[in-house]
Every structure is written in C-alpha cells, then in structure tokens.
C-alpha cells in the first residue's frame, strides 16, 4: 500500500518557519522608512503559520497556537484607531504622527516613530484576516 | 579612464536590456503554458517558472536604477513562491491542502 510520508517537509518547516518569522519582524520594524511595513510583515507571518499548518495539520497546530485568529482582527483595528485618536491628546488632527531620536545603552541612537504603533495594528489585522481566509478555504471536511 | 567606465556602462546597459527582453519572452511562453497547459502539474510548473522570472525581473530592474532597496522584495517573492509551490504540490499529491490529522 502506497502511503506518502512527509519527513523532508516537516524537517524543512521547523527550520524555515523561524527564518520566516524573523524576516517578518525585520519587515515590520524596517517599515515607514524602507521597504516593509505592517502589511508585508503580517503577510509574511501568515505565510509562516500557513506553512506550519500545511506540514503539521490542524489538530497539532491547535495545541501549538491556541489563538482564535478572528479576535486578532478586532484587536488590530482597535490598536490602529486608538493610535489615530491618540493625536487628539496633543491638539493635533486625526492620525497625525511624529518621531524622535532616543539613545539606548546597547544599540546607540535609534529613531522611534509613532507610525510604528499604527503599523502594529495593521500587522495584527492583516495576520488575522489572511489566516482566517486561508483556513476557511483550505480546511478539509 | 572615463572612456573605460563609459564602455562598461554601455555594456551593462545592453546586457540588462537583452536579459529583460529574454525574460519577457519567457514570461509570455510560461503564461501560455499556465493558461493552456493540458494537466494541472503543467500549470504548477509554469507558475513556479513565472515566479522565478519575476525574481529575475526585479533584480534586473534594481541593476538598471541603481538601488539596493529591491533586495527585500526579491527575498519576499522567493519565500512566497516557495510556499505557493509547496501548496500546489501538496494539493496535487493529496487532494487537500490542510489535513485535520496527519497520522
């Protein structure tokens, strides 16, 4: 009886998923000045999670990642909207952003922007939407 | 010295244009195979080839307008292409993309 096994796929996934998640974090923090940002970072994280779903199956992934991805959508949208309303505290128009340079003991001078908080909201929203779409299309009955 | 630099510039320009035209022709042929291809594995291989050609196209354009900003884009296309090829291969092999229980 022919029974396909996927040893190579599983071994490769455990290596590549970490690289993908690291690249996703890099894309998220490189945004607003360089290519990257919340959307692509969320897409990359979704790709890593879908890769793990493909090679391990639904039952195992429910134990590894016990997250309801639909709640991530609302959390992300809430973060993004609250970032927009945060500008009202400083008598600025909706979604106004600012940045400044800070000294850190190990990393040196780093530019921190409030656009990063908005990007994190976009990241969570895109992650939730993409995983929800792919899982509801691709689940076997 | 400047004439040598200009000669290499011209040579690079010509090489990039020839590569762009070759990749364009290759993309057209692959598109024909992806739409017309008699079986599903044909279409899978054609989509894989289209992705590889897209990576080459992005690299050539980053040579043409001298910039390093496209390196992330090339890496991103490569990763998404890898996962796409994997998904198509598993769909053709097993009929379902995500199994409920693997064993």
Image (tube, helix red, strand yellow):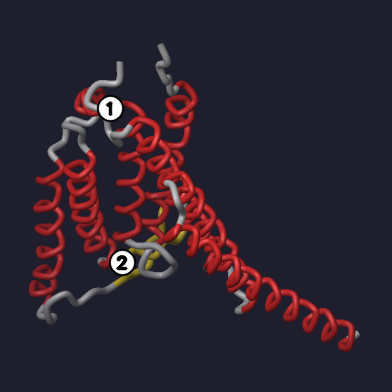
Mark 1 vs 2: CB contact within 8 A:
no
Q: Quadrant of residue A50?
A: top left
Residue at left offset 19%, top offset 27%? A62
Percent from the top left, x then y, of residue A92? 13, 80
Q: Is residue B39 above or below residue A99?
A: above
Q: Is residue B51 above or below residue B14?
A: above
- Ranked by sequence position, the earlier of labels 1 and 2 is 1
- Is the residue at mark 1 from the same chain as the one at mark 2? yes
Residue at left offset 11%, top offset 65%? A81
**Residue B45 or A56: which is nearer the viewer?**
B45
Name of the residue lying farthest toward the top = A1
Quarter of the image that includes the C terminus of chain A: top left
Percent from the top left, x then y, of residue A17? 41, 37
What residue did someone put label 1 on?
A57
What distance separates the C-alpha of mark 1 from that of mark 2?
39 Å
> Residue B2, labelled with which disc?
none
Q: Please name which of the two marks, 1 or 2, marks the residue nearer to the observer.
A: 1
Can the viewer see residue B62? no
Left-right relation of A100 to B13: left
Quarter of the image that includes the N terminus of chain A: top left
């Amino acid at each position: 009886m022919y029974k396909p096994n996927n040893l190579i796929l599983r071994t490769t996934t455990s290596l590549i998923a970490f690289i993908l998640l690291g690249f996703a974090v890099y894309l998220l923090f490189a945004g607003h000045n360089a290519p990257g940002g919340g959307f692509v970072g969320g897409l990359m994280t979704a790709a890593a999670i879908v890769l793990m779903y493909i090679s391990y199956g639904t039952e195992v992934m429910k134990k590894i990642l016990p997250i309801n991805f639909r709640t991530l959508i609302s959390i992300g949208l809430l973060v993004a909207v609250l970032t927009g309303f945060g500008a009202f505290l400083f008598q600025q128009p909706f979604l106004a952003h600012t940045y400044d340079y800070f000294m850190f003991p190990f990393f040196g001078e780093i530019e921190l922007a409030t656009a990063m908080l908005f990007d994190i909201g976009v990241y969570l929203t895109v992650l939730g939407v993409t995983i929800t779409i792919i899982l509801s299309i691709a689940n076997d009955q | 010295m400047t004439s040598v630099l200009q000669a290499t510039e011209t040579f690079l320009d010509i090489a990039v244009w020839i590569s762009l035209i070759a990749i364009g022709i290759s993309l057209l042929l692959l598109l024909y195979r992806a739409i017309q291809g008699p079986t599903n594995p044909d279409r899978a291989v054609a989509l894989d080839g289209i992705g590889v050609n897209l990576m080459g196209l992005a690299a050539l354009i980053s040579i043409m307008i001298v910039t390093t900003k496209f390196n992330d884009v090339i890496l991103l296309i490569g990763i998404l292409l890898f996962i796409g090829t994997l998904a198509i291969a598993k769909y053709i092999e097993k009929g379902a993309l995500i199994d409920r229980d693997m064993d």
